[in-house]
Amino acid sequence: MQSNSWRLAVMCAALLLAACTHAPPRNPLAHWVPSPNQSARKAMLIVLHYTEQESVQQSLHTLRTGNSDGPVSAHYLIGDRGDLYQLVADERRAWHAGGGSWGTISDVNSASIGIEIDNDGREPFTQPQIATLLRLLDDLCTRHGIPRTNVIGHADMAPTRKIDPGRLFPWQRLAEAGFGRWPAADHGPAPPGFDPMLALRLLGYPLDDPAAAIRAFHLHYRGIDTMTLDDEDASVLHALMAEQRK
């Protein structure tokens, strides 16, 4: 009888501990009077990166330890063969974006999910990687209600510092699967008076350094690494503005 009482006490203690583990943190200085008018912090953006390292094992180490520039992390890492690793829970803030902005979002880490892709920046992305990425994007956008157009590159939100996922990343393929933005194939020239710099800002690019923003736009939409606008840029930007208004 005593043994049964002891086991019951242990089970109750374990259940109480488990409940406390999952309970929201409470300030002991205040009376807890919970309000239903709340929700979990919610991602609005997905940022894609390349690792610029030699192996997924090296990247797993980097994303889980400190380094010379301070600790970094990401929510997910996609290996060369399409293997998928999760390092940070979706609802938690990973340290993947750093300084930068996208549209009105100035703290990108707090409003985004970061996906690293195992790539050294000099070679094409593999078919298994892109297949895994598309499945993951579909899952994240569906579960979290993230607009499917809100998939950008690290360079897009931090053009003065970053170029990843680089000019070899297949943005058009992602757009054909419904993620990100891409101009219509039959887009014509921009009309007279069209302002391409205004269009860049309206897309979301930070314009603190206009040349850097143009370079990031070129890497994403034209696969080139230059910093001056031409007529084709104006045409592409006009088509993207038309898509955004739909």
Image (spheres, helix red, strand yellow):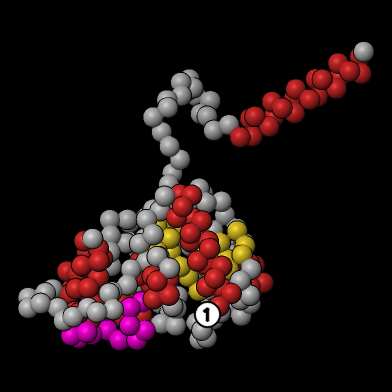
On the rendered structure, is 63 left or right of 202? right
Give me the residue at 41% from left, 50% from top: 145
Out of 121 and 149, give the one closest to the viewer: 149
On the rendered structure, is 95 left or right of 246? right
Residue 91 image position (x, y, % from top left): 50, 48
Q: From the image, which quarter does the N terminus lie in?
A: top right
Direction front: furthest residue: 186
Q: Quarter-wise, where is residue 218 in the image?
A: bottom left
> In the image, which residues are magenta?
220-232
Out of 131 and 22, give the one closest to the viewer: 131
Q: From the image, which quarter does the C terminus lie in?
A: bottom left
Q: Is residue 22 above or below residue 83?
A: above
Q: Is residue 80 above or below residue 144?
A: below
Residue 17 image position (x, y, % from top left): 69, 29
Residue 131 in the magenta stretch? The answer is: no
* Helix, strand or loop for the magenta stretch, by majority: loop
Residue 165 image position (x, y, % from top left): 45, 75
Residue 104 image position (x, y, % from top left): 28, 56
Q: Quarter-wise, where is residue 226 in the image?
A: bottom left
Residue 221 in the magenta stretch? The answer is: yes
Is residue 132 something one can see in this rendering? yes
Is residue 164 something one can see in this rendering? no
On the rendered structure, is 245 left or right of 24? left
Name the residue carrying label 1: 125
Give me the residue at 14% from left, 78% from top: 190
Q: Amino acid at mark 1?
A: Phe
Give me the residue at 61% from left, 76% from top: 80
Q: Is residue 11 above or below residue 156?
A: above
Give me the residue at 61% from left, 71% from top: 82
